[in-house]
Image: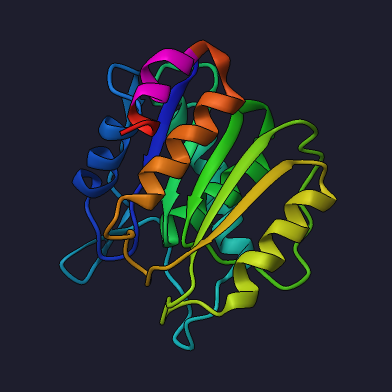
Amino acid sequence: MFALLGLHGSSGHPAFIRNFIEKLAPGVSSTCPEGTFADGDGFTFFRRRPDFSIPEEELLDLARDSVAPAGFVCASGSETMLAVGYSSGAIFATALLAVAPHLFVGAILLRPQVISEGFAFPDLSAKPVLILSGLNDSRRQPRHALQLAEQLSAANADVTHHALEAGHGLAPDDADLTLAASWMAASFTSLLSPIAAIGRK
């Protein structure tokens, strides 16, 4: 059985993603670390440049630190994990997939963005990845989720992408939760019973 790794967004706190995970998979082991850097009223897992671009090599180095023996991924005590990231946490989740694909069974990426235009993932054969983007997201361009889906598919990941009637925040009708629950039930049969029940609500 794998555990869930929740990664919150910029200026955020673990409580946000923990609340999502507890509704998504009650009773499943999970860990929701706090971002490394202070950011506004909260924390973040990496810092953007002044022009808001993503410092690719710095991001990947931080991801490598996170999967090192002293990092928070290994500290969770789980051999394999499903990454569940929101916003910049979703970007950090893709970095973790890139540097340590063997530690992750897949990922749920809420409002993600590509690390870079030409980023290439290592082989992710058969790893399921769910992308949930917002059609009215003021912080993302429509192409961002499509580009990420293409990059992941090029690495042989099993990608599912839904563009929701939502902004950067979670959809008010719980569409993110419902779709994530259905996707998990279909992708990981060992969790079918508890998760399918959520998806039917």
Q: Nearer the viewer, residue 110 or 134?
A: 134
Residue 137 in the image: above or below residue 1: below
Colour convention of the picture: rainbow
Q: Quadrant of residue 6?
A: top left
Picture quadrant of residue 165: bottom left
Q: Which of 179 and 103 is in front in this view?
A: 179
Which residue is at a point 46% across and 74% down the rendered structure image? 48
Q: Does 43 appear above or below 178? A: below
Regarding residue 186, the answer to whether it shows in the image is: yes
Instruction: Measuring from the top left, give residue 53's x and y in whole percent.
Output: 54, 79
Q: In the image, is residue 166 part of the stretch drawn in magenta?
A: no
Of residue 153 and residue 31, the one placed in the foreground of this image is 153
| Residue 118, position as x, y percentages in the image | 78, 69
Residue 12 percent coordinates (x, y)? 25, 59
Picture residue at 67% right of the left edge, 61% below the top: 148
Residue at 60% over, 34% down: 106
Indicate left or right for 58 with 197 as reference: right
Left or right: 106 as drawn, with respect to 109: right
Q: Say left or right for 167 vs 102.
A: left
Secondary structure predominantly adopted by residues drawn in magenta: helix
**Residue 71 visible in the picture:** no
Q: Is residue 192 magenta?
A: yes
Q: Residue at x 39, y 32 (%)?
A: 199
Range covered by the magenta-colored residues: 191-197
Coordinates of residue 123 in the picture (x, y in percent)? 82, 39
